[in-house]
């Protein structure tokens, strides 16, 4: 049993939203109690005390859409790759990487991303993986890392026709095998979705195979209308817009995540809402790829469950929050919009997305909720409470200020030191695999 106290406590709970000197009592994997530090220490004298030293105690972050396979790309330059449009970004960078990513490379990528998550207070991710060099067993390699580092993970494999039928069938089978394994294991920290790349690389035949292999067991995780090429392909080759085509194949529904949804029209928005399908915005990635700005305001107004991801552009959810707000205001040419919409995406809606795949309540510190707690090293020099915490986060905090991370009741990092992890050894392994990947991409040795 732990008591994490002596900090400014933000619970995201209506029952007790803020305490100036608050604490959280953690028993096993759940939160047992919240309250004043002195009161909780008196009530549970046997508990080990973790001192927040005046920092901000708050719920850990959730990343609703990321890509482990891109973790080893940091600093990479591929010879001859100078993309001028979104398709060239995909083909020249990301597909080139996943075509060279081995199982060992996948494991190294997962290790790297999970360490970065811990250091930035992210304890739950929804990942969308691709490693067309070696497909079978890749999700199981990631699951091994997830268990090792203690990060709650919902995993899937990116089915695509882009590398031929054999690879496509392997990707479908990897999803099916991992779903079956999760059903048997019943690990509360692992879940499965059925992944698909994007509609312009998935034929009707492949969609039918995906649906048959899934057999209604879980939802789908797929990129939708990220670039206009997705829209053009659907209209020209199938006579349907992307979201309509997904509906034709039975892909939509309350357990399905549509990533991006930048170029959706009003009819598609209505269809997403009527099927209770989830959407995840990835603001930095969208701007970096120059594909447009997600229509957050219309999607939110329609009542769609709209979450926030990073698309692996970063692992810092606060960084994405800042960019989400600025991009929406810049796009609308209005400085007074989107505050509530983007903060709800990160702090409320991501927890609701998590609830569709994990039983323990996430994103809140209250009795019975998952013990996913972080401490941010932040000393405010202006008034601070639950009434203005989002303003402090947007203008005063970054993920790197996280100093302590607890996931599912397990202490993963204390005072910026990883617990039970030989970080130097893990980093050495990651570096070795990244050199192999870079060498394979550039036909040289690093």
Image (cartoon, rainbow, N blue to C red):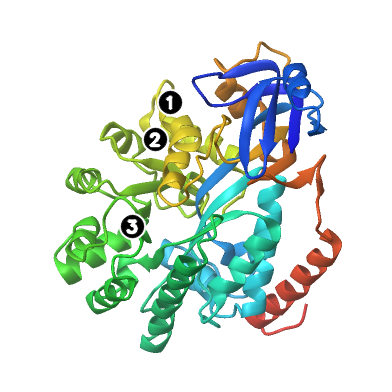
- Where is residue 25? Give x, y as percent: 69, 31
Along the line of sight, which residue is nearer the eye, 192 or 187?
187
The span from disc 3 to disc 2 (Cα, nearest Å) is 20 Å
- Where is residue 4? Give x, y as percent: 74, 31
Seen at 27% across and 53% down, the residue is 253
Seen at 60% across and 50% down, the residue is 314
Q: Which mark is residue 340?
A: 1
Residue 125, above or below 382 = below
Q: Residues within 10 Å of mark 2 (few under 14, many from 20)?
A: few
The span from disc 1 to disc 3 (Cα, nearest Å) is 24 Å
Seen at 47% across and 44% down, the residue is 283
Secondary structure under the numbered disc 2 in the rendered image: helix
Disc 3, disc 2: CB below 8 Å? no
Secondary structure under the numbered disc 1 in the rendered image: helix
Seen at 51% across and 44% down, the residue is 360
Q: Which mark is residue 426?
A: none
Comparing labels 3 and 2, the label whose residue is closer to the camera: 3
Residue topped by disc 3: 224
Q: Which mark is residue 331?
A: 2
Residue 416, above or below 138 = above
Q: List the single residue furthest toward the left.
A: 239
């Amino acid at each position: 049993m732990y008591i994490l106290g002596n900090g400014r406590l933000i619970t995201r709970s209506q029952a007790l939203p803020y305490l100036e000197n608050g604490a959280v009592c953690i028993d096993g994997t759940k939160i047992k109690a919240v309250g004043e530090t002195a009161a909780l220490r008196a009530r549970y004298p046997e508990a080990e005390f973790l001192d927040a030293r005046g920092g901000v105690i708050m719920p850990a972050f959730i990343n609703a859409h990321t890509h482990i396979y891109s973790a080893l790309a940091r600093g990479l330059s591929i010879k001859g790759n100078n993309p001028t449009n979104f398709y060239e970004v995909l083909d020249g960078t990301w597909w080139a990487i996943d075509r060279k990513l081995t199982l060992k490379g996948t494991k190294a990528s997962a290790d790297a991303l999970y360490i970065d998550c811990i250091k930035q207070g992210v304890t739950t991710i929804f990942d969308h993986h691709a490693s067309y060099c070696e497909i079978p067993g890749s999700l199981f390699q990631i699951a091994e890392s997830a268990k090792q580092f203690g990060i709650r993970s919902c995993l899937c494999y990116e089915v695509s026709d882009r590398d031929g039928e054999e690879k496509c069938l392997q990707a479908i089978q990897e999803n099916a095998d991992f779903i079956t394994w999760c059903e048997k294991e019943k690990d509360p920290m692992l879940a499965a979705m059925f992944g698909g790349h994007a509609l312009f690389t998935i034929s009707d035949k492949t969609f039918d195979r995906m649906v048959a292999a899934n057999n209604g067991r879980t939802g789908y995780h797929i990129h939708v209308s990220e670039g206009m090429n997705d829209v053009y392909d659907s209209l020209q080759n199938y006579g349907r817009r992307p979201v309509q085509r997904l509906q034709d194949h039975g892909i939509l529904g309350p357990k399905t995540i549509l990533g991006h949804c930048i170029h959706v029209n009003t009819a598609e928005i209505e269809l997403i809402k009527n099927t209770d399908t989830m959407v995840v915005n990835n603001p930095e990635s969208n701007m970096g790829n120059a594909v447009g700005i997600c229509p957050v305001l219309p999607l939110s107004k329609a009542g769609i469950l709209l979450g926030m991801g990073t698309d692996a552009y970063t692992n810092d959810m606060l960084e994405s929050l800042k960019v989400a707000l600025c991009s929406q205001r810049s796009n609308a040419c209005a400085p007074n919009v989107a505050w509530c919409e983007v903060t709800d995406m990160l702090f409320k809606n991501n927890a609701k997305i998590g609830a569709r795949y994990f039983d323990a309540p996430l994103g809140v510190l209250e009795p019975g909720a998952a013990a996913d707690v972080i401490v941010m090293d932040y000393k405010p020099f202006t008034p601070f409470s639950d009434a203005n915490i989002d303003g402090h986060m947007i203008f005063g905090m970054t993920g790197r200020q996280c100093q302590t991370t607890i996931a599912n009741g397990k202490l993963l990092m204390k005072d910026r030191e990883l617990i039970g992890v030989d970080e130097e050894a893990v980093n050495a392994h990651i570096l070795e695999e990244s050199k192999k990947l870079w060498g394979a991409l550039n036909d040289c040795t690093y």
